[in-house]
Image (spheres, grey):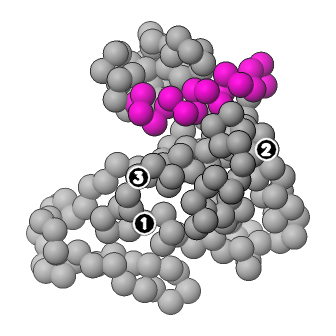
Amino acid sequence: MEPGRLEKFPSPGRGHGLRALKRARPGELLWRAEPFACTVTKERLGGVCERCLRRNERLLRCSQCKVARYCDTRCQKEAWQEHKRECKCLKSIDPNFPPDSVRLVGRIVFKLVTCASEKLYSFSDLQSHIGELSEEMKEGLRHLAQTLQLYLKVEVQDAFQLLPTIDIFQIFAKVSVKTDS
């Protein structure tokens, strides 16, 4: 669907919605976007390309951090701009390894610091649902935020170096999945 045929709208109690402004044909692609940030889980490392997320048994390993793996040199080169900061962080804490959520939020922080906002949605549009979190969950997120600061220290020596709009606790709350029991 060409630009201008979609709009973002507030959806009370649910955040934001996306709707077509013109009639669409069944099966018509309405929107395509790269994920803002993603990471391969620790259990899948070594079997999935960090760039395209394809499974592959014979992946090239990053020569610096020895963690990231890629299908080929093309995937590795395409990923380098986003990986180079994470690479330094991974090397700096070796032999320790951060939790998956810390790696993901680290990638989000690097992207927020270095890129312009997205076209239709921005990361800031996501809801954190902090008010709905239990105190136990909030404490867990605070602990993850502290872990992230240790992980990122080689690239971000001081939290004040981050853009003033970046709130690490909010980011963790946005990427944490809340499930209703």
User: Is the residue 95 above or below the residue 171 in the image?
Assistant: above
Q: Disc 2 designates what residue?
A: 147
In-front residue for pair 27/32: 32
Residue extent of the magenta highlight: 79-96
In the rendered structure, which amino acid carries the disc numbered 3? Answer: Cys
Sequence-wise, which precedes: disc 1 or disc 3? Answer: 3
The answer to which quarter of the image holds residue 92 is: top right
Gap in angstroms between the C-alphas marked 3 and 2 = 24 Å
Q: Are marks 3 and 2 in contact (CB under 8 Å)?
A: no
Q: Residue at x 51, y 69 (%)?
A: 124
Q: Position of residue 143 (x, y in %)?
A: 84, 52
In the rendered structure, which amino acid carries the disc numbered 1? Answer: Ser
The answer to which quarter of the image holds residue 95 is: top right
Say which of marks 3 and 2 sits in front: 3
Q: Residue at x 73, y 77 (%)?
A: 132
Most frequent secondary structure within the magenta stretch? helix
Q: Is residue 165 left or right of residue 69?
A: right
Q: Disc 3 designates what residue?
A: 115
- Quadrant for the N terminus in the image: bottom left
Q: What mark, if any, has residue 122 been given in the picture?
A: 1
In the rendered structure, which amino acid carries the disc numbered 2? Answer: Thr
Kindly tell me whether residue 165 is visible in this rendering. yes
Q: Position of residue 25 (x, y in %)?
A: 11, 69
